[in-house]
Amino acid sequence: MIERKWFRSKNQREKARCANNGKVVAHWTDDCKKYIKYAEYFDTEIFLKDLKERENVEFLLCKNYCKEETEKTERQFVTAKYDRDVKISDNLTVRLINAGYVPGSACFIFTIDNKKVLFSGDSGSGYSSI
């Protein structure tokens, strides 16, 4: 969850309050500001779940927010091919090998200071405390 300084449309707030359990779109991006004629800002940065409780209204995330956060998340990932070392830092690499039990699944071989550790992705039968 992310603390943001949210805002909403005053008109939308009133419609939500009139229609019991109505929903209000919560905005925070500059791109949204140019399309909202009467924006109503919340006084402090707050988690959306806390804003819902405080205002007693169901908030939905705006499309711009979802798009921007998705793009930020996507930039943190890279595609890696099987059987090639991927450098993570000066002394750490990882190699993906085909696990074979689900298409696209992989085991990870981490190499740090010439020592190797295999992570299979399996952590027990469900009865284990691991």
Image (spheres, rainbow, N blue to C red):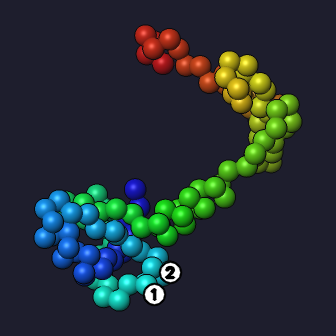
Query: In the picture, residue 19 is in which quadrant?
Result: bottom left
Q: Nearer the viewer, residue 103 or 110?
A: 103
**Structural crowding at the residue carrying mark 2, measured as other residues with C-alpha within 10 Å and reported as few (<14), some (14–19) or many (≥20):** few
Where does residue 118 sit, x and y in percent of width and height?
71, 23
Residue drawn at (28%, 58%) of the image: 49
Question: Disc 1 versus disc 2: distance between alpha carbons?
Answer: 6 Å
Where does residue 90 sit, x and y in percent of width and height?
80, 48
Kindly identify which residue carries mark 2. 31
Look at the picture and state if 17 lies above or below 76.
below
Where does residue 21 sit, x and y in percent of width and height?
17, 59
Residue drawn at (62%, 24%) of the image: 121
Query: In the picture, residue 22 is in which quadrant?
Result: bottom left
Q: Nearer the viewer, residue 31 or 48?
A: 31
Horizontal relation, residue 38 to residue 96: left or right: left
Residue drawn at (77%, 24%) of the image: 98
Kindly identify which residue carries mark 1. 34
Look at the picture and state if 70 lies above or below 14.
above
Query: In the picture, residue 39 is in which quadrant?
Result: bottom left
